Image (cartoon, rainbow, N blue to C red):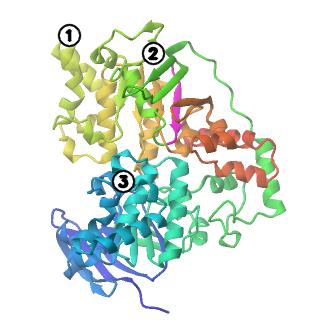
Amino acid sequence: MSQPIIEFKDFGFQYNAQAEPTLHHINLSIYPGEKVLIAGPSGSGKSTLASCINGLVPFSYPGTTTGSLTVAGIDAPHSSLFELSKHVGTVLQDPDGQFIGLTVAEDIAFALENDQVPQAEMKKIVDEVAGLVDIQDRLTHAPHELSGGQKQRVSLAGVMVDDVEILLFDEPLANLDPATGKQTIELIEAIQKRTGAAVLIIEHRLEDVLWRSVDRIILVEEGKIIADTTPDELLASNLLIENGIREPLYLTALKYAGVSVTPEKKPAHIDSICLDEADRQMVCDWFANTAPAVQQEQAEVLLEVQDVTFGYNDGQTNLEHVSFSVRKGEMLSIVGRNGAGKSTLSKLICGFETPNSGRILLNGRDLVGDTIKERASRIGYVMQNPNQMISKPMIWDEVELGLLQTDLTPEERARRVEETLKICGLYPFRKWPVSALSFGQKKRVTIASVLVMNPEIIILDEPTAGQDFRHYTDIMEFLRSLNRRGVTVMMITHDMHLMQEYTNRALVFSIKRLLHDGTAVEAITMPELVKAASLKETSLFALAQRCGIEPPQAFVQRFIDYDRQVREHE
């Protein structure tokens, strides 16, 4: 066997700013050409592990190391960030944070310029690498003009020009629509086959990564490696559930049906899993014996969007002829490809932008003359990143901020803030600084600062992006509890699991238009719609087809309803 390209021996690391080590007794070997998925809940240490490999630890994040770590034969903790960058290429979660050049070609060529490569040779290398990632027709474009998936390709090209032996991806799917995420996983596999590089992927979306095979999954918890095994072995165990990581939905469905999931059944992917006749019959019996959910009565219409068209620039449109209505107490998803107009729609509803034509009505009244402040008292908007919304250092002050612009007395404001903090589970932290909170808790603070205004609708942009399953569930169950209190919830999301599990209805957008307004199940089981809107068919649909259940859409809906009931009673 060849020598490891990465080797940890009894390795530990403690940040200077922390009282306890983040990594404990890490023993791990990764070999040339391997593809390894590193998984674990938020705060488990997996990102620190990656930062040790690419040199950010200890050079950008100082601390104390114990044991040893070699990367491409180099003593990593005692090397330099520059030297390690010649062997390790890192693609960040947010590609925008990685761009340097004014054009795609300049950005790809950045490392070559640093190495003083002659221009003719540089151009040849850039053209070759751009061809590898299929971005050669965008070389003269500015990076900000590209879609999310194209930005990922440019980031990948930028780290490939050095012909690195290790490619490290930090949550590469977090900001991508489902189809683009799928293409990214395919691209990573294609690049690995062409270059022979070792590939490490850190990602919460396990089922999406396993769209293409990986050699091993490293499971990290509390700074320790608790599993280093094959996907089939790990998925047949209970380690994912026990450590707050979502298992693929088809496995949950099989378990509900009483099917025993073993490594021999090759459960790593819905296409590879081996189901015998008895297994398939158990799934059919479960479907036949599980009652469908009772349909709720429809409430009156709250929000109406009528034939809305809008463009940021003259002669160009970002949304065209969009019409739909939202009923009081609904909880719905807004889904579709990157750049389809989903966030633009929310800006129009909140009054940040004004339609070129068409109307937006709330409770039957046209909002055209309302200011942003007036709309904010009835329509709340929560951004994806809480750090972009929070402006006060203390939690209480942040939640109270919006009320300072109202006619409420100090006593009335205090009562409203207290009630909201209790609803949001933040009352014990009311005197804390915001900086002391986790990302998920900050998210709750931003929701509380909107909720305190008693809005009729809350619009959330990617409420669970970058969250592990435990924090994802906390946020979504909290939003569900608000919805039960009568708050109408609209969520922009790329997460097909979220759409299935928490919303009955989905508005599906693609290239400026509302393509479909129907059930969440329809959005992920209609092949033409899935393709047009860059969505992803659910593995539950494939499971139903393999078991001969007709129509498979009914099985998907039955699972969603049943799973929702199970989680509500946990």
Q: Nearer the viewer, mark 2 or mark 3?
A: 3
**Main secondary structure along the magenta-highlighted residues:** strand
Outermost residue to the bottom: 1
- Give the distance between the C-alpha atoms of the residues marked 2 and 3, in whole angstroms: 34 Å
Q: Which residues are magenta?
A: 327-337
Which residue does the image show at 63% across and 53% down from the upper left? 252
Q: Quadrant of the C terminus?
A: top right
Residue count near mark 3 (Cα–Cα under 10 Å), binned few <14, some 14–19, many ≥20: few
**Residue underneath mark 1:** 407
**Residue underneath mark 3:** 140
Q: Secondary structure at mark 1?
A: loop
Q: Nearer the viewer, mark 3 or mark 1?
A: 3
Q: Residue flagged by tag 1: what amino acid is it?
A: Asp
> Do tag 1 and tag 2 residues touch (Cβ < 8 Å)?
no
- Give the distance between the C-alpha atoms of the residues marked 3 and 1, in whole angstroms: 54 Å
Q: Position of residue 339 (x, y in %)?
A: 45, 39
Q: Secondary structure at mark 2?
A: strand
Q: Residue flagged by tag 2: what amino acid is it?
A: Ser
Quick one: 119 or 50, which is closer to the camera?
Answer: 119
Q: Residue flagged by tag 3: what amino acid is it?
A: Thr
Queried whether the magenta region covers residue 3, the answer comes back as no
Queried whether the magenta region covers residue 335, the answer comes back as yes
Which residue does the image show at 69% across and 27% down from the upper left? 294
The mark found on residue 357 in the picture is 2
Q: Nearer the viewer, mark 1 or mark 2?
A: 2
